[in-house]
Image (cartoon, rainbow, N blue to C red):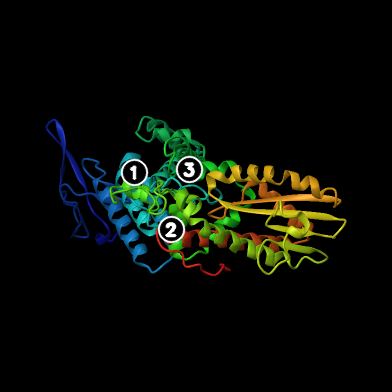
Amino acid sequence: MIIRVDKCSTFGIKNALTKSIQYLPKLLINKQLIPKINIGEAFQYLGRYFSFNMSDEHHKSELISLVEELMADIDSKPLHPKNKILLYSRYLLSKLSWHFTVSSVSKTWVTENIDSKVNSYIRKWLDIPISGTLSTVFLTRNKFGLSICPPSVKFIQCQTVLRKTLKTSPNEAINDLWKATSNSKNIQYDVYNSTKQVLKDFRSGQEDKLHTQLTCQGSFFTNITKFSLSQLTKIWSACQSNLPKNIFNFTVRYINNSLPTRQNLARWGLSPTSDCSRCLAPETLLHVVAGCQSYLERFTWRHDSVLNFLATSLQTVSGSHLYVDFPGYKSPSIITGDTYRPDLLLSTSTSTGTLYIVELTVGFESNLQKNVERKKSKYKELIREQNEHFNSVKFVNLSISSLGVFSKECSTFIEMLNDFDFQKQHQNYCIRRMTTIAIRTTYYIFCCRNKEWMNPELLSV
């Protein structure tokens, strides 16, 4: 066997009276002195550092340097925030996996030193201020998050894999090693059965925090989980991913209520008042995008932008008659009279057949269900009247949020598209377009707060 001296090192410990000390051994191979590990220094074996006092300082220093280097490198790339997040999730965390498996650092240290550095970059990429929570970002995409986790969760997963491997190994000596280390600081990770359980518990904790502690920043999440149509969440997430950087970050900050409304600015000490410049009511996010009475023209513009696309899409339905409360179309009043005027009517026959009464509402997330109930009550009598003229009357209560989230009641909209033989791909296209129009118009309304409204043309994406 050939031993290369330049690939070797010596590390010496000896007894000195009543204690052990490190010394510099002199070992030769083929008359060549093997390099020595200096006093106080450590050597690395299989990724782990060993020193005389068995300190983690060398490994901690390497971990901090590695994270700073990789995060700075990702930050320097001219990439969309979603791609920077993706690089962090798939590249950086994988680079840390072996370190988290073999080192003996604690979760507390990882949280305080590694999480804090990573979180500062994530905030920078997503324009989230220090006062904005990241709990919404850590949720899965089907719950309007970005499906990422902090390094501390990856650390727990790595320790879980390590502990489980030791415990379930067919080698008895390895089992003994697990028993011998069952009183160490990482014994807490024996409670997990898999890495999926670690992630599930972490995200469950974030959801609980949004529900019970961060009630203001968790308002969107609380209302959406109750009242949204979950089967369309994947489409919403896809729409968000395709947005340009500024609007993408707007949606993230909208979700955790960290946008610079006057109420937030006053809370942060950056504005002398929290009142709206138009009506003097508190300028909350709800007030700006769906509540201010001085902005009704803007909200109508958003509503009509969505309605215009919907009407254009339904024009292709053969053998039907379309009535839209919008210039360029026959008025719904032709059928309903002047007492009721829903947004859109679609009949399969003038005298017999089915009449679809479509009422579109674009409002704040906390009002999703209220809008549904209000419109049901409003058109109850109209539905009864039209049942006398049509074999079937179907009320499509199309209530969506300012950020393009469809309410549970919108299942009637999906049923209507199925009745018209819209293919699944075509249905998804319509939903994507309506979602995108709602998001972009809300973004524009927010950007124009406290400014004069210039009556822009209806948005068509």
Give the number of the mark in front: 1 or 2.
Answer: 2
Q: Which residue is mark 3?
A: 219
For marks 1 and 3, the one nearer the N-term is 1
Label 1 – label 3 distance at C-alpha: 26 Å
Q: Picture coordinates of residue 313 (x, y %)? A: 69, 66
In primary-sequence order, the first of circles 2 and 3 is 2
Q: Nearer the viewer, residue 86 or 401?
A: 401
What residue is disc 2 on?
85
Type of the residue with mark 1: Thr
Viewer-nearest residue: 458 or 73? 458
Quadrant that contains the N terminus: bottom left
Spot occupied by residue 162 in the image (x, y as percentages of width and height)? 43, 42
Evaluate if marks 1 and 2 touch, with contact meaning CB atoms under 8 Å apart.
Answer: no
Q: Residue at x 76, y 54 (%)?
A: 336
Report how many numbered discs are placed on residues in the image. 3
60 up-or-down from 348: above or below:
above
Q: Secondary structure at mark 1?
A: helix
Residue 363 bears which disc, if any? none
- Asked if disc 2 and disc 3 are in contact, CB closer than 8 Å, the reply is no
Q: Amino acid at mark 3?
A: Ser
The kind of residue on which mark 2 rests is Ile
